[in-house]
Amino acid sequence: MKQNTMFPNVVQKFISDEEIQPLIELVGYEDTARKLTVKTLIQYLVTAAACEWKSLRYCADVGTAAGLIDVNYSTLSKKLGQLDYALMKQVFALVVRKCNRVTRRTMKIPNQLLLVDSTTVTVGKMRLPWAVYHGKRSGIKLHVSFALETGMPLDVIETTA
């Protein structure tokens, strides 16, 4: 996956602008950027997670080599600071819904075995003030259910860590 430069193109075709716009309006975010839009930021985040990039500075350095537009790391940092966590949760739910629809239609399995896993994501206290975790940190716990047959996530439920 680290050598795959087609991943941003797949994400771009998988999630359309028409599907992202209602999600942006739902959380009340106003996208005023010309170069680094919400969709571009999502492409950066998805590619960074898939390729296991280590920092925003590294993302900005290797983003063009991975097929993304050239963006400064401070611009990425500012945009991430303004972006609401709820929007990213809705985008992930959209991707899960799209994957599941295709797999449900192609594989007609009457009974599914679900795998459930949880992980804790910690951030600074000011990023998620409603989810105080430990000292000066905040955190959430994501409970993810997977379909064993397809290896795809079915649902994500968040709780405070």
Image (cartoon, grey):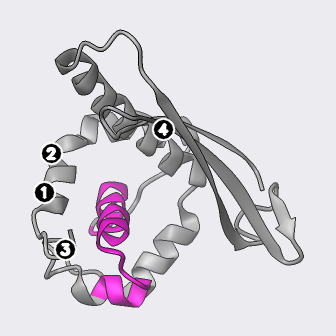
Number of dots carrying numbers: 4
Q: Residue at x 43, y 44 (%)?
A: 92
- Residue 93, horizontal then vertical, whole percent: 45, 37
Asked where in the image residue 96 lies, by quadrant, the reply is top left
Q: Residue at x 41, y 80 (%)?
A: 75
Q: What is the number of the mark on residue 13?
A: 2
The residues bearing labels 4 and 2 have C-alpha atoms spaced at a distance of 21 Å
Asked where in the image residue 105 lies, by quadrant, the reply is top left
Instruction: Name the side, left or right, on which 151 lies relative to 144.
Output: left
- Residue 6, horizontal then vertical, whole percent: 10, 63
Q: Give the camera-side residue of 129 and 26.
A: 129
Q: Residue at x 68, y 71 (%)?
A: 123
Of label 3 and label 4, which has the lower sequence position?
A: 4
**Residue topped by disc 4:** 25
**Residue topped by disc 3:** 69
> Where's the N terminus, which quadrant?
bottom left
Residue bounds of the magenta highlight: 35-60
- Residue 135, horizontal then vertical, whole percent: 89, 76
The overriding secondary structure of the stretch rendered in magenta is helix
Of label 1 and label 3, which has the lower sequence position?
A: 1
